[in-house]
Image (spheres, grey):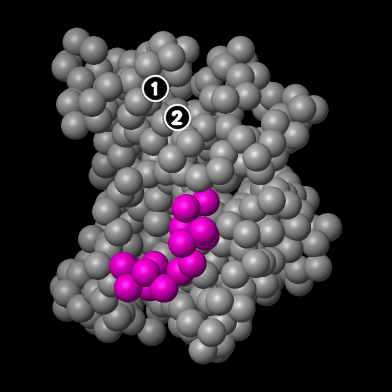
Amino acid sequence: MTASPPSTGVREAVQTYYGSTLTSSADLRTSACCDASAVPSALKPLLSRLHPEVLSRYYGCGLVCPPLLEGARVLDLGCGSGRDAYLLAQLVGPGGTVVGVDMTAEQLAVAEAHRAFHAEAFGYDNVHFLEGYIEHLEQLELEPGSFDVVISNCVVNLSTDKLAVLRGVRRLLKPGGEFFFADVYADRRVPQALQADPVLYGECLSGALYWNDFLRLARQAGFADPRLVNDHPLEITDPELAERTGELCFFSATYRLFQIDDLEDACEDHGQAVIYRGTIPGHPHRLDFDKHHSLEAGRVFPVCGNTFRMLHQSRLAPHFNFISADSSAHFGLFPGCGSVMPFTPGVPGGDTSVKPTAAGSASCC
């Protein structure tokens, strides 16, 4: 696994890029840190209540709003101007709490400036912000095991110590809690020369992990079975940056990592199954748990032991019936548990709607 670039200068460059170089999302030179994914209709009214300046300073790469957040305690890593924090504040409601952490004083100043505006709009004030580094969460006044959900949006790629971020998140999560986050990944290891490019780093590209290295780091941090929720290829729209990155392919991807001890390192079949009750708000007929588990309400759905435990030991449990909690039986590996790149492919630097041909698929599939 390639080493992270030296942190000297990188952190300062990122702070400058997001603190003063960028004044709005219109200043970005690629789509990587400002993904144009369609916003679910249920969230559009919530976003419409946010202050325009908070929205204009948004640099995320996806949506990080898992279901069942009412009353939850949520931590937003790299909260920036507070868009996701104020969106989540409405989802957790007056009985929940959202804590935002960011290292960029200029961004936090925007978030803080509009706290009263959002408190009046929502009818309650359940958000607060901390200045600090996501690699050093242990230095903040945050109680271990106190968060139901940790989220981040196109931020982990900017960190120079991603393993420390993952370990810090696991320390703060309650048992059964989850890290639900969107980020940018590459189809191969980014060359060291590109990692030193301040623009590519600030645009969330050259700090992106090779997807398989991310899986290794997650497991090293104690998240044994990372689950891909969704993904799509990113287009580098700036010709100069596209020329620099060459054949590298980048993806916006959302993962969920559960704080559950002793998960297995593969999808093992223990003869277990679940039935989704259809009771999660907004998901009456089907719940897309991850990219490979779309659970139709009322249907018996065989699952591996890890999926069974993720559902059984998390906040999702009341919405499922569980068949055979005894994991002593074993029927081998579930079919289809391979190690190929999990993302949907695209074409490097070009139209993301075009799929590579068989002859060119080796570099991007």
Q: Which mark is residue 73?
A: none
Instruction: Say whether residue 279 is visible.
Output: yes
Could you say where residue 112 lies in the image, as x and y percent from the top left?
A: 66, 67
> Quick one: quadrant of the N terminus?
top right
**Image quarter of residue 2:** top right
Is there CB contact under 8 Å for labels 1 and 2? Answer: yes
- On the question of residue 273 being in view, the answer is no
Q: Whole-Å distance between the Cαs marked 1 and 2? A: 6 Å
Q: Disc 1 residue type?
A: Asp
Residue marked by disc 1: 238
Going by the picture, which residue comes out furthest to the right?
A: 139
> At numbered mark 2, what does the secondary structure look like: helix, strand or loop?
loop
Which residue occupies the foreground of this view, 36 or 209? 36
197 w.r.t. 128: above or below: above
Queried whether the magenta region covers residue 53, the answer comes back as yes
Asked if residue 21 lies left or right of residue 154, the reply is right
Magenta segment includes 191: no
- Camera-nearest residue between 322 and 19: 19
Crowding at dot 2, Cα within 10 Å, few <14 / some 14-19 / many 20+, comes out as: some
Q: Type of residue at label 2?
A: Arg
Q: What residue appears at the point 81 percent right and 68 percent down from the top-left corner?
A: 141
Nearer to us in this view, 209 or 323: 209
- Residue at point 48% right, 82% down? 121
Up-down relation of residue 280 to residue 268 (above or below): below
Q: Which residue is mark 2?
A: 29
How far across and down, in percent of the image, does residue 86 sit?
52, 70
Question: From which residue to which does the magenta span run?
Answer: 43-57
